[in-house]
């Protein structure tokens, strides 16, 4: 029998010979069935549809969230302006705007504020002096520079009197140099006083004991019996770097009024001053022109950095008025430190 010729392009399925129709179906499946491999994807698709039907609300929520995230990202990418780099001109303009719209405190104000917590008012008390022994002016009335007779007083402290039966003989200033209550002041502020009191920056008052005196420098060291919590000591500085023209402030209680602040400059260095009675010459003094008056004695002379470089000691006035005419003197902290046995540097 002649065989039928088969070509590669024939549409006839291979193996579709006369006996193919009689071949039994594989695995007992009817002819034309796709078998288990075709049934598996259909079952999986059915499970997915069932899950989607049960979780329709959750899927809608997740889809909405994804859409919102895509829209937000597109907005940020397309519509937000790109960050701008700051130039030096921008920085200078911002600084100038701040300086013109928000005035900063002056250098003198900042310097005074740094030393203010360490400033104290010092008062000396004793038995009342007879009227004939009180210092007189040329007109026969008490001199205005006599501390106990000064008419201008700080009203906020007028209610605080001294020890009973005693009179205020002197009023001056002082500065805390050790945080346990050790205070540096002038000798002439506490000289002759039977009792000494100090008033701190918070208004609290305490009696003080005189620890040591140094007449050659007109200095005295006193210590308060009770101190406020967290009492700070002043920052002591060196006068070696000072030059005439450097700015300074004098802080104290002139005529008992204070704390008062006056600003000026260093007028000279290494000056000498002879006391009015001529019995003592002070040397190595700082000359300054910040206003000082009776009651300023013992107060700190402060640089613009807040460092105490001197203790206000004397004023020069050729008249008997005893008030400031432009020249004041301060003992340097270096001299004061050596005198009281404390090296400040």
Image (tube, rainbow, N blue to C red):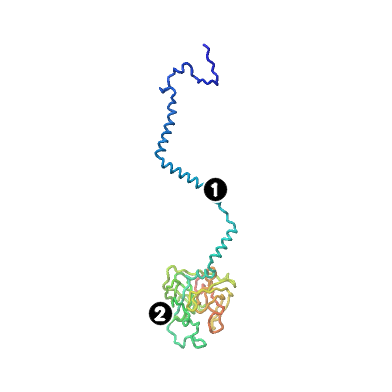
Q: CA distance from mark 1 to mark 2?
A: 81 Å
Q: Residue at x 40, y 79 (%)?
A: 163
How crowded pointer 1 is (Cα within 10 Å; few <14, some 14-19, many 20+) is rated as few
**Disc number lying in front (1 or 2):** 1
Q: Residue at x 40, y 36 (%)?
A: 50
Residue 329, compared with residue 26, is above or below; it is below
Q: Secondary structure at mark 1?
A: helix
Q: Nearer the viewer, residue 114 or 207?
A: 114
**Given contact means CB atoms under 8 Å apart, are the residues at marks 1 and 2 in contact?**
no
Q: Residue at x 47, y 16 (%)?
A: 18
Q: Nearer the viewer, residue 290 or 40?
A: 40
Answer whether residue 291 is visible to the viewer in this image.
yes
Q: Earlier in the sequence, mark 1 or mark 2?
A: 1
Residue 216 coordinates in the image, percent (x, y): 52, 78
How crowded pointer 2 is (Cα within 10 Å; few <14, some 14-19, many 20+) is rated as some
Query: Can you identify the residue that label 2 sits on?
Result: 163
Query: Can you identify the residue that label 1 sits on?
Result: 78
């Amino acid at each position: 029998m002649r065989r039928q010729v088969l070509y590669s392009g024939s549409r006839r399925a291979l193996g579709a010979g006369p006996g193919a129709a009689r071949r039994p179906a594989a695995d007992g499946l009817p002819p034309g069935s796709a078998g288990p491999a075709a049934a598996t994807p259909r079952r999986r698709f059915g499970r997915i549809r069932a899950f989607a039907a049960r979780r329709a609300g959750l899927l809608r929520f997740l889809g909405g969230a994804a859409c919102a995230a895509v829209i937000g990202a597109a907005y940020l990418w397309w519509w937000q302006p790109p960050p701008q780099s700051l130039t030096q001109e921008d920085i200078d303009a911002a600084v100038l705007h701040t300086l013109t719209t928000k005035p900063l405190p002056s250098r003198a104000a900042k310097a005074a504020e740094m030393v203010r917590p360490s400033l104290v008012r010092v008062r000396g008390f004793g038995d009342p002096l007879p009227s004939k022994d009180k210092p007189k002016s040329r007109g026969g009335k008490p001199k205005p520079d006599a501390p106990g007779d000064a008419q201008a007083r700080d009203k906020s402290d007028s209610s605080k009197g001294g020890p009973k039966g005693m009179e205020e003989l002197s009023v001056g200033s002082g500065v805390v140099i050790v945080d346990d209550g050790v205070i540096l002041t002038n000798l002439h502020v506490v000289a002759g006083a039977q009792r000494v009191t100090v008033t701190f920056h918070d208004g609290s008052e305490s009696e003080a004991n005189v620890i040591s005196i140094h007449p050659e420098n007109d200095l005295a060291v006193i210590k308060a019996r009770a101190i406020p919590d967290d009492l700070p000591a002043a920052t002591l500085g060196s006068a070696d770097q000072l030059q005439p023209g450097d700015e300074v402030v004098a802080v104290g209680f002139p005529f008992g009024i204070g704390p008062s602040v006056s600003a000026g400059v260093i007028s000279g260095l290494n000056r000498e001053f002879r006391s009015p009675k001529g019995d003592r010459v002070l040397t190595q003094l700082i000359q300054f022109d910040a206003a000082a008056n009776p009651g300023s004695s013992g107060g700190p002379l402060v640089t613009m950095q807040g460092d105490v470089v001197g203790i206000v000691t004397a004023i020069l006035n050729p008249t008997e008025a005893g008030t400031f005419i432009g020249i004041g003197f301060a003992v340097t902290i270096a001299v004061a430190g050596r005198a009281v046995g404390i090296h400040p540097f």
